[in-house]
Image (spheres, grey):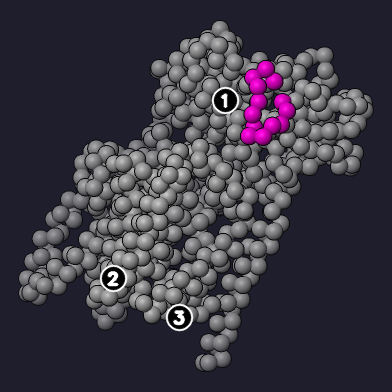
Amino acid sequence: MRQWMARSHIPAVFLLTALNLAVCWRLFQVEYMDEFGSIEGSFIAIARYVSRHWGDFSWFPLWHCGMPFQDTYVPVLHMMVAIAASLGKISAARAYHGVTGVTYALGPATVYWMAVRMGAHRGAAFLSALFYSLFSPSALLMPDVAQDLGGFWSARRLQVLTVYGEGPHITAMTILPVAILALENALARRTGRALAPAALAIALVLLTNVPGTGALGLAVFCWISVQPAGRRAAAWVVAASAAVFAYGLACYGVPPSALATIGANMGSMHPDYAGSLKYESLLLLLALAAVAAGGHLLARTRLPLWLRFAILYFGLITAVVLAADFRKLELVPQPLRMQLEMEMGACLLLGGAAWAIYGRIPRWIRPVVWAACLAPIAVQFSNYRTEAQIDTQPVDLASRSEYSTAQWLDANLHGQRVYAAGSFSFWLNAFSETPQMMGCCLQGQSLPVLDWVHYLVNHMTDPKDTEATKAWLQALGVDALVVSGPSSTDKYQDILQPSRFEGLYPVLHREHGDTIYAVPRGRPSLAHVVRTEDLVPRRPGGRMDYSEVVKFAQALGDSSRPFASFEWLRGDTARIRTNARPGDLVSVQVAWFRGWKAWVRERQVPVSADGLGLIAIQPECEGDCEILLHFAGRPDGPFAAVVSVASFALMVALFCRSAIIMNRMQ
């Protein structure tokens, strides 16, 4: 038994995981925390919707006037949470905290495994993972982080999870070391069976978090750069093969069309990054060239592979993060979020340095050193547990305006679309299935006009601009406007001068400092009979004139026109009933995507987009007209599904083939 304990890595992994579980254990007991500035409300909303609509969530109607589910957010964590909620018969919020608590606790264990697989002594790997568990180097390197934490000895990784809601990022960081150790294993064995786990790990990171995927890409580049000269070319081949294989596995979750949407929104979401690419992209290339040169030089030293990797990874991520922190230079999207990956590299170096010092201490003194180290470890453990207790305090939902307003909307508006901002927008769909004009996760947004209306409502306080909000909201099918006043618990209160809407919109409800205004639309339906000349015309770049929007909004509210009822039959299918004349169109205030199809009496009719990006149907019928509107998925959906199925089949075949060969050899 003692020999097994001395050789096995299981005790170290168990101890590290138990240590982190002891820190974050309250996550497994709390449903809603008193951290409503956190974006986790949006992640809970996705999982909540999936858990209530299994087999019927290809279209996500809650955000951005509707969007394909693949555009909401990369899906792995949300699917895990939805499965946990459904199987455990618990709320999505409870499941979310349980799943992210597990991924948080496993993070240091995967760092340990990665270091050991890359040649680290178990002692050095354990110390690195211990530093990663109980120390946040970013507080020493970034004054803003230290101020946010309230000192140098608090838990940044835990704070990012609980206060800011970065569950997907924390989960991706737990998988990142697995991808690197799997690549190292694939390089050593050069077999398809060894390549498959590396591809699977990379695919899981890609399907979990975009910043985590960027950090993994930089980690893979560092891993290649530190390889000995004789293995570097093979490392490129292994990494490229694993990356292609990984995208094949992930293709259905992140199809090319979703990647195109993310790319199209990159500039508006990250203007500093877009500017850096335009004017200073050479700096990123120079940084990567410096890493490659540094790896070449380090490979000629006696430093072990894992330590060379730690030096390069820490250096590269630190340069990216600090350039954004001090110079506002974004070499990658959202570089400040990579501060946690910077900590991973720093802790590997700290663990290596501590082990090197420990190795120079005479053996008879080492027990004394261990005993002396127990005190600061215990202090840090206590600090982390105290912070966890503070950050995971349960909330009295009845005291939160986000909750009370969501409940009122759910009970009184019955699925009608609303405009919401601030933390209310984050949390509305964690409590309700009330659709929003905006919602979360701008990388998946397809209607550029929404950004303009969002800015108009929130920031433009001139009376003429406030008056103009009415036509825009009517044109986009919004029935209610939620405005947070000074006494609201809304964390951000994004809408400036909230009193400016008084008198312009009728008041529906007031509670906890929130006011819900009715947006008068005449007919609370998402479908309307119009003429071609009523639509906002399509122009290059999405240009439109305000007078065209006013004309469109007036046409939608014209009571002399036939009424068109709109009813969702499924998440991706709606039925419209109206009385049409030849030449009439039906405008549907739902975002248009390739994949929307419409039928009238089993006859397919044309569907297109208007200048706002909403659906326009040519029913080509006279008199009573029933239209079936269905979202069949993006055009690249079947291709992406075939690619993913083929990739999974290949992965299974590689494992089975290797198993058959091993059985024959035995």
Q: Nearer the viewer, mark 1 or mark 3?
A: 1
Region of the chain picked out in magenta, as a range:
536-548
Position of residue 416 in the picture relative to residue 329 (left or right): right
| Nearer to the camera, 427 or 559 | 559
Q: Position of residue 641 (x, y in %)?
A: 67, 59
Give the quadrant of residue 650: bottom right
Q: Nearer the N terminus, badge 2 or badge 3? A: 3
Q: Is residue 547 magenta?
A: yes
Q: Amino acid at mark 2?
A: Leu
Q: Which residue is mark 2?
A: 297
Residue 169 visible in rendering: no
Position of residue 573 in the picture relative to residue 373 (left or right): right
Asked if 308 appears above or below 86 in the picture, the reply is below
Q: Which residue is mark 1?
A: 453
Q: Secondary structure at mark 3?
A: helix
The reply to whether dot 2 and dot 3 touch (C-beta < 8 Å) is no
Q: Secondary structure at mark 1?
A: helix
Asked if 364 appears above or below 212 in the picture, the reply is below
Q: Amino acid at mark 3?
A: Arg
Position of residue 239 in the picture relative to residue 304 (left or right): right
The residue most toward the top is 503
Q: Position of residue 439 (x, y in %)?
A: 55, 34
The reply to whether dot 1 and dot 3 touch (C-beta < 8 Å) is no
Q: How busy is the neighbourhood of tag 2: few (under 14 within 10 Å), some, or many (20 plus)?
A: some
